[in-house]
Amino acid sequence: MAKLETASIEAETPAMAMAEARALAARLLKAAEEGRVGNDIFDEKAVIWHNTDELTLSLAQNMSHVLMFASKVPHWRYEDVRVTPFNGGFLQQHRWVGKTVSGEEFALSACAVARIRNGRIASIEEYFDSAPIARLGVAAWAPKKSAETA
């Protein structure tokens, strides 16, 4: 796994840090669903790592993956969202659900570990099963071994 920078929330008390983390997670979800994730949520040097391809990407690089996914599942939403703040970030568990362009149901369970620096997301580690993405015919997020042999 690529080494990710550890970041922390600067807050007066642990309770404030937890509230900040929960609020930032809510802003991230809303922005993602609206297709407008940017520097008001992410640190300018933010990185995103995926368990499926073991790549660490910049926000811009990751957004190209998200746009590729959205072209296959244009009407998607988050369901069963659970956020657990911790000192320095939050754990988010959720399901991505929607319908593909061909009308098939799509569902993907995921877990994201976000680290926060100066009130913004500095890094995210995303964990999910690549099989639902592979069924869409999307090369993004494909496991390294599959990508090398394809």
Image (tube, rainbow, N blue to C red):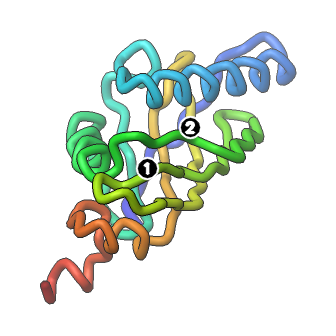
Picture coordinates of residue 46, whole percent (x, y):
37, 33
Residue 145: image quadrant is bottom left
Q: Secondary structure at mark 2?
A: strand
Q: Is residue 77 visible?
A: yes
Direction from residue 20 to residue 124 in the image, left or right: left
Residue 59: image quadrant is top left
The span from disc 2 to disc 1 (Cα, nearest Å) is 9 Å
| C-beta proximity under 8 Å, tags 2 and 1 | yes
Residue identified by numbered label 2: 115
> In front here: 10 or 58?
58
Name above or below for residue 7 compared with residue 79.
above
Residue shown at 31% from the left, 63% from the top: 141
Picture coordinates of residue 9, whole percent (x, y):
64, 24
Which of pointers 2 and 1 indicates the residue nearer the eye?
Answer: 2
Name above or below for residue 20 compared with residue 79.
above
Picture coordinates of residue 127, whole percent (x, y):
52, 61
Direction from residue 123 to residue 113 in the image, left or right: right
